[in-house]
Image: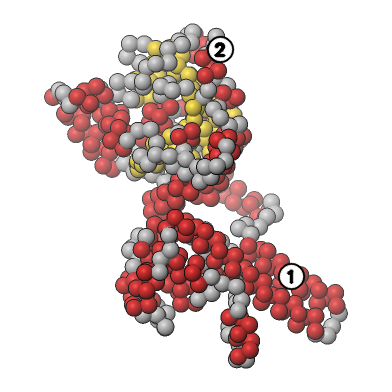
Amino acid sequence: MSALPAFPSLPDDPSEQNLLHSLPWSQEAETGLIGALLTHNDLIDQVADLLTPEHFHDQAIGRVFSAASQLINTGKQADIITVFNLLQEQSRAQGISLVWLNELTHAAGSARSVRRYAELIADKALARSFASAAGEVVDLAREHGPILDRIGMAQAKLETLQTASTKSAPKAIQVFVAGMLDRIQAMADGKAEPGIPTRIPMLDRLLGGGIKPGRQMILAARPSVGKSSLAEQLCINIAKQGHACAMFSQEMTCNEMVDRATANLGRIDMGVLQTGRLGVDDWGRLAEATEQMVSLPIFFDEQPALTLPEIAAKARLLSRRHGIKLLVIDYIQLCGSSNPKASRHHQLEELSRGLKSLAKTLGITILTLSQLNREVEKRTSGRPAMSDLKESGAIEEDADVVMLMWRQQQGEHSHLIGLEVPKNRQGRTGEVALRFEGSTQRWGESTESLASHKKSHSYGVEL
């Protein structure tokens, strides 16, 4: 968030002081927000993109917000004692006491409303800056000198406010040239990768090197084709390269996701894991899988009916604390909405566009899983199309990459799964033949050709 123009210090004239004190601000929002933040530190992720300490009319609360943000952003607990100690160390505790800080926590507003408090505080701060700029414009009107020059100066002051309220300003192309040359040179020298490889070679070629920051990818299939399992395989592959990933499953529990990861990493049959009847070799592989999982930066979440604000808050927290590069949402049709009165079509539009914005803001890849409608099963070929994305065309429109899966062949020990990339901004479209070992939840690229097999219409096997 851009810093607001400096608000003038209190004048000596009492009448002018009264004028400034009458300017718009919300004591309830400021105390409610800071009290809630000191009680629940994770709320910083809902307000950090809107507020700076300068947005607070009460300068003492602004200093408390600054200290609390500094502590939280460095992974430390921010409470009345740690904040007070930090302010004392920085010689900024004037007018602030432990008793007053304790009163703030008792005046904490609702944790569910802190985003609205932040919006209200930012709006009031902009209004105060507007009033200050308006006073300067009046002074310019009273001065002597060429009127057009004074009008130009007035316009510049108001444009400063517009810039402060805009998250980013358009930039000329030459601003990006040097960075582009450095990026290409680094890749040419082998010092940088074009993307984080998925370790599925053909898919990486289509994606131009792997997953890339700021992208929203869609992975869609009918139920039980294996999209959740493939998404978890991608998380494992990327985490093995040292990049943190997260999977928010609204369908499976964390224990189920851990079981799949255990089967995958240890090459242990899922049936054996679920019954606990492990053989001698299985116990050794279990120990190996456990050792790997302890070191992998993968995070699971099982909260059902996630709303966009909840997803964003969790994603910001993971990005800030662990630097995640890939976030999997499984799956979009199970997400809840912050606007339950809207039609389901509009709810999914809000989710799809919000997730795309979140990917760009955090500089991560968001892989959103989606169901396909039943029209797929009516086709002789059995192959899905982008128009089969269930409930909303916005899912297709907002995605940078769309991947569609179908079961091509089912064997005794493995499955041949087709994956098509029909949409890929700044990349190639094409097909990938995948091999799926259901017993161990392992995926890889298949050497078989998709064209040489007829489509099987079996949809009832849980993978």
* Residue 379 disc label: 2
Q: Residue at x 34, y 78 (%)?
A: 99
* Residue 156 disc label: 1
Residue sticking out furthest to the left: 280
Residue sticking out furthest to the bottom: 13
Give, as a three-letter code, the residue at label 2. Answer: Arg
Residue 107 in the image: x percent, y percent?
A: 40, 69
Give the distance between the C-alpha atoms of the residues marked 2 and 1, in whole angstroms: 62 Å
**Quarter occupied by the C terminus:** top left
Left or right, residue 340 beside residue 291: right
Residue 77 in the image: x percent, y percent?
A: 33, 63
Residue 164 in the image: x percent, y percent?
A: 63, 65
Residue 448 in the image: x percent, y percent?
A: 44, 13
Q: Is residue 424 visible?
A: no
Give, as a three-letter code, the residue at label 1. Answer: Ala
Q: Residue at x 43, y 27 (%)?
A: 227
Q: Could you say which quadrant of the image residue 462 lies in?
A: top left
